[in-house]
Structures are given as C-alpha cells and as structure tokens.
Amino acid sequence: MNFLVNLSNRRRETISKEEFLEDYYVKNIPVILTGMTHSWPALSLWTPEYVVSKYGGIEVEVQADRNSDRLYEINLDSHRKRVLMSDYINTITNGNTTNDYYMVANNGNLSKTELKSLLDDIEFPDYLDGTDTDGKAFFWLGPAGTITPLHHDPTNLIFAQIYGRKTWKIIPPYYTHLLYNYTGVFSEVDYENPDYQKYPLFRDIPTLEVTLDPGDAIFMPVGWWHHVKSLDVSISMSFTNFVFPNRFHWNYPEIKR
C-alpha cells in the first residue's frame, strides 16, 4: 500500500529522455507528466467548438449503443457507427452524462481521416517519435460519463488529457492473479459495481486514484491495470510511439462469448 501512496505523489513537470527511460520506463513504474503538454498548441486550441469549426464536415467513426452491451469493449466491432463530426459533437455536448457513445482509440480516426492534421498541434517530447505516429497515436473524444472498463494494455503508453478531466483507478500488475482476468486483457469485475460474492478476491485489492486535469499526461506501463471515467466532455490523446522498444508477447486468456 505504501508503494501506491508514493505513486500518487509521483509527478514530474520536466524530465529528460534519459531520466524517463531509467526511472520509469525500464522499471515499469507509472508517472504523471505535468509539463509534457504545456507547449502544445492543442492545449489552448482543442475545444468542442474548435473541433466543429475545423472538422465538423468530416465523417468519423465512433462507438455507439454501448449501454446495451455489458461487453461493449470486447464486442467493439458491433458498435462501430459512422457520423458527421458536427453531429457527434452536438450529441456529446448536450449536457447528458452517458457511456452510450464514445470515440476511442480503436476507431482509428487519426489514421483514417483528416483528423491527422491534429498532430500539427502537438510537440512530441524526445522520448516519443513524432515521425512514427501511424497506428501509434490515438484521438479520444466523448461526453462526461464514458467508461473504459478495468483492463491492462499490451504495450507501454502515454495518455494526455487535453480538455476536460478523467479519473483513473490504477492497480499494479502483481495483483493480476486476483483480478479475474478471464477475458482477453479485461477483468471480469465491474469496477463501479463489483459483485464481491462472485469475485471475493477483488475486495481487498489496493487501488490508486488519479484525476488528470487538462494538460496532465500519465505514463501507463505495460501490464498495469486501469479503469478510466470521464468527469466532463473530454478530449484526449494516447501514444505508443516511444523511441524505446515497445513490443511484447502476450498469452491472453480466451475471450468468452
């Protein structure tokens, strides 16, 4: 538990490539990067209104009807929907808190559409490769209330919060054996409404909670579990384009249908 308390205070405003590699990347330790985005034009430009003004007429892919399916992340292909960006922005800014629709990394809009020019508003730190973004840089856009359920990622990543806030609930990888990881990279446990009779081992797992404000970024090492919820209409970016090796072999639990 002391490790988690210390982690909650692990914030770096400035960090060199060498420090990032030696202190966090190779040690598989998360860190909140409070200054990584401060020089980005995106931090002042990216609002829902800006996105509509520049990209409102393009067709994008989003996830829809998520509330109808407990396994919406696993069944993501069933929830893909094409919409105009302007219509989507109007929907997510209507004041409702919902998890029913969300533009996520797997929609791949940054690689497939004119949204790729959003990368012009980002200044990559020297531990990320700004020339290697195809399929390694991802745009997230959604209303307050979106939930990415408890899971771990198969690569190291950095998640940057640009607009709005998101709360992260984080669990170290050495609790994996208590997380009922029976479904791909996902836990069977509903973090927001855990069934302790069905999943008793989950009750005593310590969790770190971190809220990312606009301008904050977090390094989430491979294998670390996290549950993410948007507190506001939210715009975010995630990156896996490190200048360091970032490929791993996984033997996933079978996905149950």
Image (cartoon, rainbow, N blue to C red):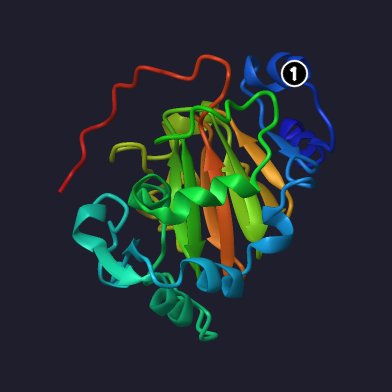
Figure quadrant of the N terminus: top right
- Say above or below: 159 vs 214: above
Task: Decide if residue 182 is in sight here.
Answer: yes
In the displayed structure, does residue 82 sit left or right of residue 135? left
Neighbor class of circle 1 (other Cα within 10 Å; few <14, some 14-19, many 20+) is few
Percent position of residue 137, x then y: 49, 40
- Say above or below: 181 vs 25: below
What amino acid is at disc 1? Asp
Percent position of residue 19, x then y: 78, 18
- Give me the residue at 69% from left, 17% from top: 21
Q: How many marks?
A: 1
Residue that protrudes farthest toward the left in the picture? 257
- Give me the residue at 46% from left, 28% from top: 155
Percent position of residue 123, x then y: 68, 39
Which residue is more in the foreground, 215 or 201?
Answer: 215
Percent position of residue 5, x then y: 77, 39
In the displayed structure, does residue 196 sit left or right of residue 182? right
- Give me the residue at 70% from left, 31% from top: 125
Query: Which residue is label 1 attached to?
Result: 23
In the displayed structure, does residue 257 sit left or right of residue 110? left
Asked which secondary structure carries label 1, the reply is helix
- Give me the residue at 74% from left, 61% from top: 44
- Say above or below: 50 vs 156: below
- Say above or below: 37 vs 155: below
Task: Decide if residue 188 is in sight here.
Answer: no
